[in-house]
Image (cartoon, rainbow, N blue to C red):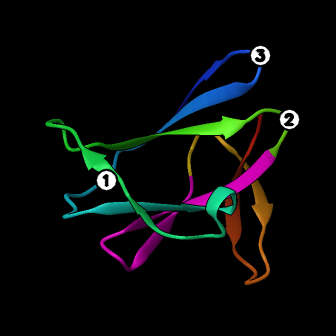
Amino acid sequence: MLKIKKNEKKVWVTFTVVPETEHEYVEIIGSWNDWKKEKMKQKKDGSFYITKVLPLDQMYEFKYLLNGSEWVNDVDAMQTENVFGSMNSVIDI
């Protein structure tokens, strides 16, 4: 799930993932930081979230990594094929 708030120069994007089963941790990786893993915070309801401040007029690819082994895409985002033959989520801000 994506929540986007823009101003003239930046955009705040809150990424939220609700795993179907219980997970110890979730990380997000994306093209905004050369695909480095970032640990997401867990809410009491079991969902995980992180807010990123990103420049406007850019397109970013990203994925979620559950417990270091299961890749998932965001249900609200567009999808594009990656170099590995699977799909990445895409956000165009």
Q: Earlier in the sequence, mark 2 or mark 3?
A: 3
Mark 1 vs mark 3, foreground winner is 3
Q: Residue furthest front?
A: 9
Image quadrant holding the C terminus, namely: top right
Decide: marks 1, 3 in contact (CB < 8 A)? no
Q: Picture quarter containing residue 77?
A: top right
x%, y% of residue 27? 40, 62
Q: Which residue is mark 2?
A: 57
Q: Secondary structure at mark 2?
A: loop
The kind of residue tagged 2 is Asp
Q: Secondary structure at mark 1?
A: loop
Q: Residue furthest right?
A: 57
Count of numbered tags = 3
Magenta region? 59-73
Q: Which residue is mark 1?
A: 20
- Residue at the image position 24 percent from the left and 58 percent from the top: 21
Residue 8 is tagged as: 3
The kind of residue tagged 1 is Glu
Residue 41 shown left or right of residue 1 in the figure: left
- Residue at the image position 56 percent from the left and 57 percent from the top: 73
